[in-house]
Amino acid sequence: MLYVNNLHKSYRVGMNNYEVLKGVTFSVSQGEFIAVMGPSGSGKSTLLNCISCYIPFDEGKITLGGQELSDLTEEKLARVRNEKLGFVFQDFMLLDGLTVRENILLPRIIKGRVGKEGESLADQLLKLFSIQHIQDKFPADISGGERQRTAIARALINSPLLILADEPTGNLDSKSSRTVINAFCEARDTLGATVFMVTHDSFSASFCDRVILLADGVVREVLERKSERAKFHDDLLNKIKEMSGDENVGNA
């Protein structure tokens, strides 16, 4: 469903050229929950920004749902972002003046096509993520975990091909982080959602189907969860420590 092939991206600063992504290749199937982990400066954010069409890449191909992104005009790229991608950010990005329900429906409100289908899907998402009891509250009146679950519901309201999540548990305590990760798992299991998450948190990553380990702009290893989550977490921590030489990586 998502194919990234030989992706290169560099930045020019003054007279110097810094290569951030150095031939990254991987694929994501429909209905997978994938995490990308790696040390700071490994290229995680740049990779996410390339997939989201917010920055151009130098070389390679990104194909989403059979559509290659590199040759699209800015207008068509904007349509891909609006119709085929859903976004979940570390800072929630909810509108304070809208209720939880209105925030979820916002992408459809903007397009002027809420309708019965949109209202029904909003009801389903509110129930799925156990936030129906706060649907008339405002973001300032709910917890961080509830805000992030609201943001996930908003990302799903247009039934996108892919959810891109950028450090979605970065501002949350452990309990709230667990509820957010459970929300992603519910979206995958109930709605068939495909989630691509960048994270520093090995605990959150251990719930994923696969974890892509990125370092120095290249994919070092792809780990597949074939065992109990706790064992996968231990295996993941060991690999990250081995890869980075930093015993604290993955515990952020």
Image (spheres, grey):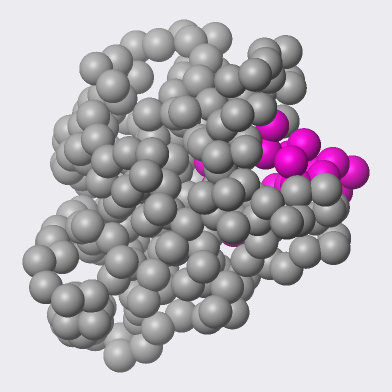
Q: Position of residue 238 (x, y in %)?
A: 18, 84
Determine the image quadrant of residue 148.
Answer: bottom right
Q: Is residue 66 above or below residue 6?
A: above
| Residue found farthest to the right | 97
Q: Residue at x 47, y 50 (%)?
A: 165
Q: What is the x, y in percent for residue 230?
A: 24, 82
Residue at (38% x, 29% y) in the render: 161
Return the residue nearer the eye: 147 or 40. 147
Residue 246 place in picture, x, y as percent = 30, 86
Question: Which of 248/102 is in front?
Answer: 102
State the extent of the magenta-drawn residues as a range. 87-105
Q: Nearer the viewer, residue 212 or 176?
A: 176
Image-based side of 138 in relation to 88, left or right = right
Tell me the quarter of the image containing the N terminus: top left
Query: Is 152 positioned to the left or the right of 102 in the image?
Result: left
Q: Residue at the location (30% across, 25% down)?
A: 64
Let me know if residue 219 appears in the view: yes
Q: Residue furthest left?
A: 226
Total number of numbered discs in the rendering: 0
Q: Quadrant of residue 118?
A: top right
> In the rendered view, would you say 238 is above or below 89?
below
Within the magenta stretch, is there residue 98? yes
Please give the name of the residue rendered at 24% of the width and 17% of the height, measured from the top-left corner.
66
Work out whether residue 46 can be spotted.
no
Q: Horizontal and vertical percent for residue 120?
A: 60, 29
Give above or below for 52 relative to 148.
above
Residue 188 forms part of the magenta stretch: no
